[in-house]
């Protein structure tokens, strides 16, 4: 888990009015828009040779579409916060495969997720974040996996939800837990039944994890947002000790904000 602050050089390079100074940005791209997004931003040519090879090895067109969309979105998004061309970004992988920005010059942390219909990327500076998305409500057959992915108390809460709300509750709990494990860098290597995410009276969420030191627990912010009435979007952010309060999260549109402006005489 990355807990150190960004080096001084990154702070010197931050642009005036840095949009990430006080919050986190989550960028959304619909799967159906990936082809247009790719045509406008460089497509496969923007990827590394290794990424293109991985893309080509995928058997199903939908998987290739989501893979390409996720890689292009990551690059375009990161370039909004640093003076680096989209095609120049390079990435490392943590012990459990979590992608991170190669080098620490910009103090940026990002995470990406894709599911059937949606690709999303979260970006923070000087913090750590994870994001996950799933279609909601979860299919009825998914509920049978609750004993494998939820703690006994979480299972009890799920059972006591109204039957017509259980699919939404399952999806919400799943994406919250997935976002948290992605933020810690563990991903699916961490058993989901090893920690809990609970609803608070005020409507928020809190993570209960014995592996987090007591003094660090208040630094974690967990939330689930509804996107386009079809997706549950889980967000986990670990802030710093001097955070004044909840970290604002902004949802942003990749198609509306990242595509090049059409030329004055070109087609619209």
Image (spheres, grey):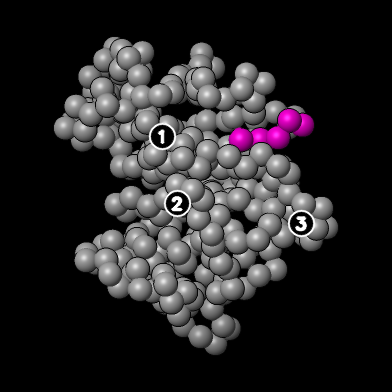
- The residue carrying mark 1 is 190
Q: Nearer the viewer, residue 110 or 148?
A: 148
* Residue 44 lies in quadrant: bottom left
Q: Is residue 43 visible?
A: no
> Residue 189 at x, y = what percent?
39, 39
| Closer to the eye: label 3 or 1 | 1
Q: Secondary structure at mark 2?
A: loop
- The residue carrying mark 3 is 10
Answer above or below: position of 24 versus 77: above
Q: Nearer the viewer, residue 46 or 252?
A: 46
| Dot placed on the residue nearer the N-terminal end, 3 or 1 | 3
Q: Nearer the viewer, residue 69 or 110?
A: 110
> Residue 97 at x, y = what percent?
45, 51
The residue at the point 38 percent across, 74 percent down is 52
Report if the CB atoms under discs 3 and 2 are less than 8 Å apart.
no
Q: CA distance from mark 3 to mark 2?
A: 25 Å
Q: Is residue 12 visible?
A: yes
The residue at the point 73 percent across, 49 percent down is 6
| Dot placed on the residue nearer the N-terminal end, 1 or 2 | 2
Residue extent of the magenta highlight: 238-242
Counting every numbered tag in the picture gives 3
The residue at the point 43 percent across, 77 percent down is 49
Local packing at callout 1 (Cα closer than 10 Å; few below 14, some 14-19, many 20+) is: some
- The residue carrying mark 2 is 97
Q: Secondary structure at mark 1?
A: loop
Q: Nearer the viewer, residue 133 or 151?
A: 151
């Amino acid at each position: 888990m990355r807990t150190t602050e960004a080096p001084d050089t990154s702070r010197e390079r931050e642009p005036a009015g840095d949009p990430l100074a006080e919050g986190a940005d989550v960028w959304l791209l619909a799967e159906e828009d990936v082809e247009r997004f790719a045509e406008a931003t460089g497509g496969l040519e923007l990827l590394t040779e290794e990424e293109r090879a991985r893309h080509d090895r995928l058997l199903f067109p939908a998987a290739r579409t989501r893979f390409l969309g996720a890689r292009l979105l990551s690059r375009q998004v990161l370039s909004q916060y640093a003076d680096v061309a989209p095609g120049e970004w390079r990435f490392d992988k943590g012990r459990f495969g979590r992608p991170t920005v190669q080098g620490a010059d910009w103090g940026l942390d990002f995470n990406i997720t894709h599911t059937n219909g949606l690709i999303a990327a979260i970006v923070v500076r000087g913090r750590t974040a994870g994001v996950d998305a799933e279609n909601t409500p979860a299919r009825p057959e998914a509920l049978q996996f609750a004993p494998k992915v939820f703690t006994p108390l979480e299972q009890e809460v799920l059972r006591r939800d109204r039957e017509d709300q259980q699919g939404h509750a399952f999806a919400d709990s799943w994406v919250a837990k997935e976002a948290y494990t992605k933020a810690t860098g563990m991903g699916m290597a961490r058993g989901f039944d090893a920690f809990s995410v609970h609803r608070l009276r005020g409507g928020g969420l809190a993570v209960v994890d014995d592996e987090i030191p007591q003094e660090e627990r208040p630094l974690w912010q967990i939330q689930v947002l509804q996107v386009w009435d079809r997706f549950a979007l889980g967000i986990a952010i670990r802030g710093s000790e001097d955070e004044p309060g909840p970290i604002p999260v902004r949802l942003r549109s990749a198609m509306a904000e990242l595509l090049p402006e059409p030329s004055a005489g070109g087609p619209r």
